[in-house]
Amino acid sequence: MHLSSPKASRRWPIYYFLWFAFAVPSCASDWPQFLGPARNGAYPGSDLADSWPKDGPSVLWKKKIGQGFSGPAVSSAKLILFHRLDDKETVESLDANNGKSFWSFDYPTGYRDDFGFDEGPRATPTISEGKVFTFGAEGVLHCLDLSTGKKIWSANVKSRFEAAKGFFGMACSPLIEGNAVLLNIGGANGAGIVAFDKANGRLLWKATEDEASYSSPVAATLDGRRYAFFFTRRGLVALDPSSGKVFFDFPWRPRIQASVSAAAPLVIDDLIFLSASYQTGAVLLRVKDNQVEKIWSNDDSLSNHYATSVYHDGFLYGFDGRQESGPSLRCVELKTGKVRWSEDRFGAGTVTLAGHTLLALRENGELMLAPASPAGFKPAARAQVLPNGARAYPAVADGHLYGRSKDTLICVDLRKPNPVKP
């Protein structure tokens, strides 16, 4: 189409309007995977309110659900819930606007938690190009049709690759890169990390002898090269997502065997931030010429246990300390590791970045809104939105927060109020 023609010029505003209406909002309206669209815990929309009414933001709907630490994923106004009902791991598609069910898919599970914790799935689903990918606590990977819930393919990595149960089952949220589904499984015979063809489930490659951690991978482009970064039980592994070729690794693991590394790698420009508990601490790395160098490391700044930190304007915001010990919420200068402020005994939870604002969902079900500022933690609003036991990561899509506790899923409207027309 030549825009110089009069006919084309008349059509251009229509095309532009359609593109703007349907393409642009998709950035803010979807939370299709663990940690959001860019897998960094950041919500890209600008439609959230700066404060809430005294009685809290409006809860649009809530639903009783089964067990699981798996967070919700949202795409095209469809919410994917992965939970355990009785002896079945169940995938449900819900209307994100009202919580009504579109379809449900389930399969048997015999998972038992050795420590008496929740026995539902741990990994957040991933939605990509009309497909849903789920990874259960016993290592069963499924690819389902987003519209119908029909199974397209499945793979049992526990039996196929002799992947270990670990302390709390398997918990890697699938990462989609090109035509590949990437997983950190800790399988035997060079299957620490595996990739499947997302169309048919065929094994594309396997790499490393590393045991699996509870961290999910992220992907990023640095100096024109595409990387997939995995924080395995042994440390950081950087590889080519298309071939499985390992570019480099960086050993970084807790000193004791009875430990869990769960925070995802955080990529900021050419820097990678890693953090773990159990006297491990944090490290900032720089990737240069396909190699990695250490900028700083210590166990005094920001030792993430389960929750991944977020980054904003030169500073990290996240949880320091073990979940069971009442961790602190902190602000840390990225380039130096200097602690700028610390809210001690804050308690465990998750933190999401929305523009210049932090959304902290505490494990006790309290949601807090505060500026992402190194000057201090000064909540502008807070509300009890869930019962105690909110350990799963929430999703923020189209101005709504979708969160879950042990048995409840909610939709909270965080949007700016509509202006009153005269």
Image (cartoon, rainbow, N blue to C red):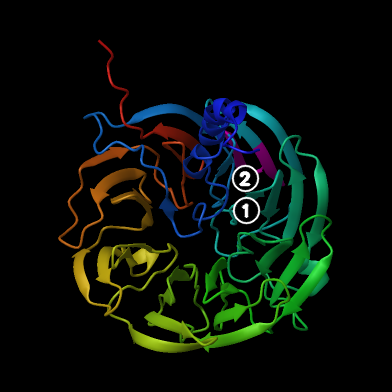
| CA–CA distance in space, label 2 to label 1 | 6 Å
Task: Indicate whether 219 appears above or below 252.
Answer: above
User: At 28% across and 68% down in the image, what residue appears?
Assistant: 314
Q: Position of residue 9 (x, y in %)?
A: 55, 30
Residue at 69 percent of width and 47 percent of height? 129
User: Which quarter of the rendering shows the C terminus?
Assistant: top left
Q: Earlier in the sequence, mark 2 or mark 1?
A: 2
Furthest residue toward top = 422
User: Which residue is depicted at the point 55% across and 86% down?
Assistant: 290
What secondary structure do most residues of the magenta stretch adopt? strand
Identity of the residue furthest to the left in this view: 375
- Please tell me the numbered disc located at residue 309: none
Circle 1 residues within 10 Å: few <14, some 14–19, many ≥20: many
The residue stretch that appears in magenta:
77-92
The amino acid marked with disc number 2 is His
Q: Considering the numbered disc 2 on the image, is that residue within a helix, a strand or a loop?
A: strand
Marks 2 and 1 in Cβ contact (< 8 Å): yes
What residue is disc 2 on? 83
Report the amino acid beneath label 1. Pro
Percent coordinates x, y for residue 321 in the rendering: 33, 70
Please state which of residues 30 and 332 is positioned toward the viewer in this rendering: 30
Seen in the picture, residue 44 relative to 210 is either above or below; the reply is above
Q: Quadrant of residue 412?
A: top left
The reply to whether the magenta stretch includes residue 382 is no
Instruction: Please provide percent x and percent y for residue 67.
Output: 58, 46
Check disc 1 and report its element: helix, strand or loop: loop
Residue 197 rendering spot, x and y as whole percentages: 79, 62
The residue to which callout 1 is attached is 121
In the drawing, does residue 84 fall left or right of residue 305? Answer: right
